[in-house]
Image (cartoon, rainbow, N blue to C red):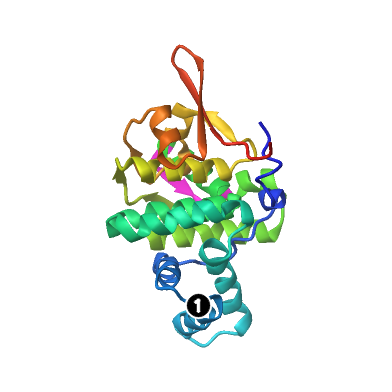
């Protein structure tokens, strides 16, 4: 079920893009600026002020470093790819109504959809945490290099995502360098948040349909304990998901096809 009409930026699946430490508070601030009605120019200026003296231990940094961080923040919440605008809009609505502790799920989903590289890294982290209780930067770098190629940018980006996840509280540093343990584990039972997160996960994949059980247990969502939901519940939440029964005990969830 290809989404030729809806997906306008297939190249993002081969790009890294996410190459900076992104603090959760910065994403929250960016989203709040939009919710407050600021235009793009005002948001850019506000982010410049926010990040002034906050990178690299508080020292002044070259404009390039700050600019790269702002590019990521803006791409996630201010100017996402065209096929993610509806997801972004509903994500902002969720941020305006759900408890603050659940905001991390919305920032996670939007980051994952805009930067599939983030999702790919999260999959390997989640798998390692399940298998061995810890996750190693070096192991994830090797796995991701198998997918994206042996580039220095790949290893650096993986490292930045680990640092971001530690800032978000979903990973905790251990006594061993480069080894992290599980941090925050958030129970989720709000059907709209769950459906929105499922949609975000599907946007992070090149195959836009997936088994419901596999979605709800996806290692890319390792910080979240998702309550059981039905395929029909998900399909009704925002109207952009389709549900298909393919067996007695198997349901597929797919992004709706808007190409026809």
x then y, percent, for residue 124: 52, 42
The quadrant in which residue 41 appears is: bottom right
Where is residue 131, by image quadrant? top left
Is residue 178 among what the camera can see? Answer: no
Residue 240 in the figure: left or right of residue 129: right
| Coordinates of residue 60 in the picture (x, y in percent) | 52, 88
Residue drawn at 49 percent across, 66 percent down: 22
Residue 157, percent across and down? 59, 60
Q: Which residue is mark 1?
A: 43
Q: SS at mark 1?
A: helix
Residue at 67% x, 61% y: name it: 153
Is residue 79 one of those drawn in magenta?
Answer: no
| Image position of 231 (left or right of 205) | left
Quadrant where the N terminus sits is top right
Nearer to us in this view, 240 or 51: 240
Q: Is residue 133 magenta?
A: yes
Identify the image quadrant of the C terminus. Answer: top right
The relative height of residue 59 versus residue 252 in the rendered view (above or below) is below
Between 104 and 243, the one lying in front of the other is 243
**Residues rendered magenta in the picture:** 132-140
């Amino acid at each position: 079920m290809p989404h030729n009409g809806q997906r306008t930026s297939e190249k993002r699946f081969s790009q890294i893009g996410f190459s900076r430490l992104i603090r959760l508070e910065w994403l929250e601030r960016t989203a709040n600026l939009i919710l407050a009605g600021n235009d793009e120019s005002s948001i850019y200026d506000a982010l410049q002020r926010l990040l002034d003296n906050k990178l690299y231990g508080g020292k002044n940094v070259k404009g390039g470093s700050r600019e790269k961080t702002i590019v990521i923040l803006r791409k996630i919440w201010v100017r996402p790819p065209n096929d993610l605008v509806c997801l972004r809009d509903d994500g902002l609505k969720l941020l305006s109504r759900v408890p603050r502790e659940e905001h991390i799920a919305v920032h996670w989903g939007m980051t994952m959809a805009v930067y599939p590289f983030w999702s790919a890294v999260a999959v390997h982290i989640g798998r390692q945490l399940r298998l061995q209780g810890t996750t190693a930067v070096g192991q994830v770098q090797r796995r991701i290099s198998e997918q994206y190629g042996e580039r220095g940018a790949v290893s650096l980006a993986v490292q930045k995502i680990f640092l971001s996840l530690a800032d978000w509280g979903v990973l905790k540093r251990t006594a061993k360098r480069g080894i992290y343990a599980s941090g925050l584990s958030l129970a989720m039972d709000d059907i709209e948040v769950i459906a929105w997160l499922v949609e975000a996960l599907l946007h992070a994949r090149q195959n836009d349909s997936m088994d419901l059980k596999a979605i709800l247990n996806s290692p890319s969502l390792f910080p979240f304990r998702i309550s059981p939901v039905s395929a029909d519940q998900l399909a009704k939440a925002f109207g952009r998901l389709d549900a298909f029964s393919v067996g007695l005990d198997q349901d597929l969830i797919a992004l709706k096809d808007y190409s026809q």
